[in-house]
Image: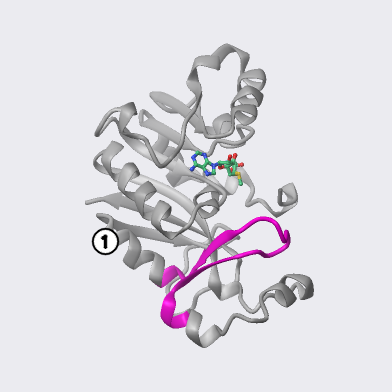
């Protein structure tokens, strides 16, 4: 697991404009992990479901929020329709949870999220950015020395191991991510760097994590 200090602070994640989106929304928080985001969402939104495919994570959330145990359930982002079609105003998959699956499954998840969102519903997620490659971290770079940056730029995405040799993560160029989202029926509203600042594609950050806010169209 990545060090907690590398997380974008939740107060930046849930800035003032985000609060307006959360208020009165029906929220699905996928890959809820230990409940970092739940803390900022549960008291604000209309309804809240925290989902994770890891049963120990869901147990940890139930222990952390004993008065809202029923808000948390074990479930896989690749299969969401049992929660009901068009039932949510806002779906989150925070801190690159989406990157733990491969290309086909990623597309499946985007399609599931699209199905459970109501018209014009919002999807907020973060992902590993290929603008961080080649890596500054010598060990991570050595593990990926075989990857050709020119080929990667054409391909748009790759699954690689960075700090941990045993964990494959999906890295993507933000502009390729936009195309993937458009194909899945989303329009991108904003792309955000690790300082919580919007960026545009003419000047993308070298940050390893970028956040997308998009809308179902
Ligand atoms: C890096 S953690 C992020 C936890 C939390 N969202 C946060 O921001 O602190 C990613 C979480 O996503 C969960 N996850 C990954 N793939 C998933 C999937 N297909 N379905 C449900 N949960 C998934 C993992 O179990 C893990 O708890």
Can I make out residue 135 in this image? yes
Identify which residue is drawn at 38% across, 24% down. 46
**Horizontal and vertical percent for residue 167?**
65, 55
Can the viewer see residue 136 in this picture?
no
Residue 83 location, x and y as percent? 34, 27
Front one among 139 and 127? 139
Residue linked to disc 1: 183
The image position of residue 214, as x and y in percent, is: 35, 53
SS under mark 1: helix
Q: Which residues are magenta?
A: 153-175
| Above or below, 116 relative to 72 | below
* Quarter of the displayed picture in which ligand 1 can be seen: top right
Q: Is residue 39 left or right of residue 203?
A: right
Task: Find residue 88 and report its horizontal and vertical position in percent.
Answer: 32, 33
Query: 166 or 44, which lies in front?
Result: 166
**Residue at x 58%, y 30% (from the top left corner):** 39
State yes or no: residue 161 in magenta: yes
The image quadrant of residue 212 is bottom left
Task: Give the farthest residue toward the top.
Answer: 67
As rendered, which of 10 and 33 lies closer to the eye?
A: 33
Q: Is residue 118 above or below residue 66?
A: below
Q: Mark 1 CB in 8 Å range of ligand 1? A: no
The quadrant in which residue 148 appears is bottom right
Residue 111 shown left or right of residue 204 in the figure: left
* Depth check, front residue: 40 or 138: 138
Residue at 60% across, 68% down? 207
Residue at point 45% right, 27% down? 49
């Amino acid at each position: 697991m990545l060090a907690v200090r590398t997380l974008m602070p939740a107060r930046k994640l849930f800035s003032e404009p985000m609060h307006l989106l959360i208020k009165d929304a029906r929220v699905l928080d996928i890959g809820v992990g230990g409940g970092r985001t739940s803390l900022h969402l549960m008291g604000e939104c209309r309804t809240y479901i925290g989902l994770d495919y890891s049963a120990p994570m869901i147990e940890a959330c139930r222990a952390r929020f004993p008065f809202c145990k029923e808000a948390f359930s074990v479930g896989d982002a690749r299969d969401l329709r049992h929660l009901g079609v068009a039932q949510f105003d806002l779906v989150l998959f925070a801190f690159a949870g989406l990157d733990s699956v491969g290309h086909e499954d990623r597309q499946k998840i985007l399609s599931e999220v699209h199905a459970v969102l109501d018209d014009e519903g919002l999807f907020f997620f973060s992902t590993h950015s290929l603008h961080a490659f080649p890596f500054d971290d010598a060990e991570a770079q050595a593990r990926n020395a075989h990857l050709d940056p020119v080929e990667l730029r054409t391909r748009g995405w790759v699954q690689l191991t960075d700090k941990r040799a045993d964990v494959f993560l999906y890295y993507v160029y933000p502009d390729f991510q936009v195309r993937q989202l458009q194909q899945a029926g989303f329009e991108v509203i904003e792309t955000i760097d690790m300082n919580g600042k919007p960026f545009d594609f003419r000047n993308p950050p070298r940050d390893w994590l970028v956040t997308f806010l998009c809308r179902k169209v």
